[in-house]
Amino acid sequence: MLAWLERRGGTVEDYAFPSRIDHAQHMSRRQYARLVDEWVTAIGLRHEEYGTHSLRRTKASMIYKATGNIRAIQILLGHSKIENTVRYLGVDVEDALLLAERTEI
């Protein structure tokens, strides 16, 4: 991070990714979405199939597949109800709830 801040002339008090309009503010969600579209297109994928939300969901799904820990995913995503996490991931409700009951964090 320090190398990045130094390269762009920033300090540790600055936003890591400032707004292109007002450098005292952070990058907007829309600006971030545009960058993700550009990155996805640059590596040869269709930007219609990938976005900020689908990437967030993909990471959560990968962690769930690797660990089976639905409670950890719930915490990472900030969901208040385990059922929302189960629905979000598209996993079997009974399996997910059984795993959540077995897992202590």
Image (spheres, rainbow, N blue to C red):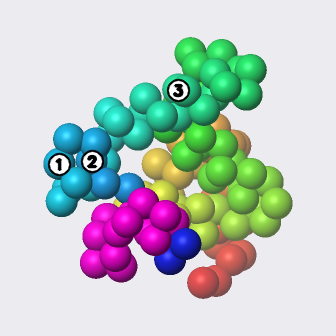
What element does badge 1 sit on? Answer: loop
Is disc 1 in contact with disc 2, using a CB cutoff of under 8 Å?
yes
Q: Residue 90 versus residue 11: which sits nearer the camera?
A: 11
At 49% from the left edge and 64% from the top edge, which residue is drawn?
7
Q: Quadrant of the C terminus?
A: bottom right
The circle on residue 22 is: 1
Q: What is the span of residues highlighted in magenta in the rendered image?
A: 4-16
First reached walking from the N terminus: tag 3 or tag 1: 1
User: Is residue 12 within the magenta segment?
Assistant: yes
Label at residue 61: none
Task: Give the SS element for disc 3.
Answer: helix
11 to 88, vertically: above or below: below
| Residue 19, horizontal then vertical, whole percent | 27, 47
Q: Secondary structure at mark 2?
A: loop
Q: Earlier in the sequence, mark 2 or mark 3?
A: 2
> Residue at (64%, 21%) from the top-left corner?
41
Q: CA distance from mark 2 to mark 3?
A: 17 Å
Q: Amino acid at mark 2?
A: Ser
**Residue in the image at 55% along x and 72% along y:** 3
Name the amino acid, label 1.
Asp
In this picture, residue 46 sits left or right of residue 88: right
Dot label at residue 19: 2
- The answer to whether 91 appears left or right of 88 in the picture is right
